[in-house]
């Protein structure tokens, strides 16, 4: 057991332990075949090539717009997914949890901001957030692994963080808008 | 445009027409001729990558699509195609990175939004997937792939009537190249209709 700020006591037992909650697919038949979305270029001006957007000055903190609601909560052997989603709801932030986020945790929060509890819980559980464009209409995706800002990280860091090839990391780095 | 460029454009255009008509052999021959003359022809690289993905020659497809995005890094469509090829190879993390990169270039890019929604669907994030797909369809109701994916989301949410509506919209909007999927969807609509009764 470790003591942390915010009166947090948290034990991450292990990822992928029993009791993990999963949505069971309910369909009337076998899954429909994949439908990959490809675009055929018809020459020159037909592929979507857009001008460089203005530099993003907005905060890339995925929780920047969180509410100040405070929470008090003590749980034992709680489902990490449920806890993260509940705290996100209290903090009024949107998240998508990767399916590999599974663990049971013990927590004790006393009168802390929900968003601070969420950050502490995620840090202790080894979760990180994959954030898209600052103005993106889709929510950030939560993964296990260290946090890396894809817009500033090196190719090696991107490859390590996202599990992509080094070549892909280099492509992303080289494709950033030049200042 | 000189005679050589004009000829290359005509060959490429013939390839595109054949590709869209499903004549992959003719399209492939045309793209290969274009690339033999101009190895850095981004659109030919892109289309050849798409064609090779459809024939499940993913190694070469990925190589060509990577060349396309390296030559044209602000090309959201090519990034989407690279992501889709990676997704088909089971490289979900690489695919998501490519889709998000495409959307970083063009946040409203329909194909990349649908592709990302498909990834959300794959991990069970139905609410987020549905929100993206509904946003795409609000902008353009003719994106057949978005209706298809939305039908899948609604089915998983047990909204049978909604799923039937989306699948029927897919059948109405699907281009000829998706005839195989249309047949699957028609059968699914029949099964869902039985469930509703």
Image (tube, helix red, strand yellow):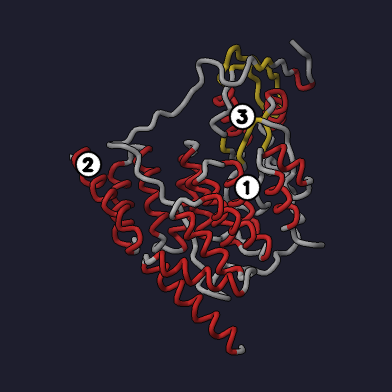
Residues beneath discs 3 and 1 located on the same chain: no
Chain of the residue that carries numbered disc 1 in the rendered image: B
Q: Is residue A102 left or right of residue B30?
A: right
Using the rendered image of the protein, determine whether residue B73 is visible from the camera's viewpoint.
yes
- Mark 1 nearby-residue class (10 Å; few <14, some 14–19, many ≥20): many
Q: CA distance from mark 2 to mark 3?
A: 39 Å
- Taking depth in this image into account, of B72 and A79 the one nearest to the observer is B72
- Mark 3 nearby-residue class (10 Å; few <14, some 14–19, many ≥20): many
Label of residue B191 in the image: 2
Q: Is residue B126 left or right of residue B66?
A: left
Circles 2 and 3: CB atoms closer than 8 Å: no
Mark 1 residue element: helix
Label of residue B97 in the image: 1
- Mark 2 nearby-residue class (10 Å; few <14, some 14–19, many ≥20): some
Whether A10 is drawn above or below A66: the answer is above
Q: CA distance from mark 2 to mark 1?
A: 36 Å
- For residue B142, what is the image quadrant? bottom left
Q: Which residue is labeled 3 in the image?
A: A87
């Amino acid at each position: 057991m470790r003591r942390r700020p915010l009166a947090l006591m948290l034990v991450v037992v292990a990822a992928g332990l029993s009791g993990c909650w999963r949505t069971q697919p309910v369909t009337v038949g076998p899954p429909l075949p994949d439908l990959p979305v490809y675009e055929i270029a018809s020459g020159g001006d037909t592929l979507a090539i857009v001008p460089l957007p203005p530099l993003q000055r907005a905060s890339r903190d995925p929780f920047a717009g969180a509410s100040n609601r405070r929470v008090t909560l003590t749980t034992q052997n709680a489902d990490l997914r449920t806890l993260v989603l509940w705290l996100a709801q209290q903090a009024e932030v949107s998240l998508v949890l990767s399916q590999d986020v599974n663990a049971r945790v013990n927590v004790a929060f006393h009168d802390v901001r929900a968003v601070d509890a969420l950050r502490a819980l995620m840090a202790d559980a080894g979760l990180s957030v994959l954030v898209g464009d600052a103005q993106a209409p889709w929510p950030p995706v939560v993964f296990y692994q260290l946090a890396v800002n894809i817009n500033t990280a090196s190719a090696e860091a991107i490859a390590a963080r996202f599990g992509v090839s080094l070549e892909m990391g280099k492509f992303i780095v080289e494709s950033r808008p030049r200042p | 445009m000189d005679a050589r460029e004009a000829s290359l454009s005509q060959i490429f255009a013939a390839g595109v027409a054949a590709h869209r008509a499903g004549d992959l052999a003719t399209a492939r021959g045309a793209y290969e001729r274009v690339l033999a003359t101009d190895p850095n022809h981004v659109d030919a690289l892109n289309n050849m990558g798409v064609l090779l993905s459809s024939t499940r020659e993913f190694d070469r497809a990925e190589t060509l699509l990577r060349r396309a995005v390296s030559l044209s890094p602000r090309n959201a469509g090519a990034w989407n195609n690279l992501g889709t090829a990676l997704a088909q190879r089971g490289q979900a993390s690489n695919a998501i990175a490519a889709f998000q990169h495409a959307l970083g270039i063009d946040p409203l890019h329909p194909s990349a939004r649908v592709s990302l929604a498909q990834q959300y669907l794959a991990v069970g994030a139905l609410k987020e997937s549905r929100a993206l797909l509904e946003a795409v369809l609000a902008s353009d109701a003719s994106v057949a792939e978005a209706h298809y994916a939305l039908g899948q989301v609604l089915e998983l949410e047990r909204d049978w009537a909604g799923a039937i509506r989306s699948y029927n919209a897919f059948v109405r909007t699907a281009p000829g190249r998706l005839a195989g999927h249309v047949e699957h969807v028609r059968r699914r609509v029949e099964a869902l209709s039985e469930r509703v009764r």
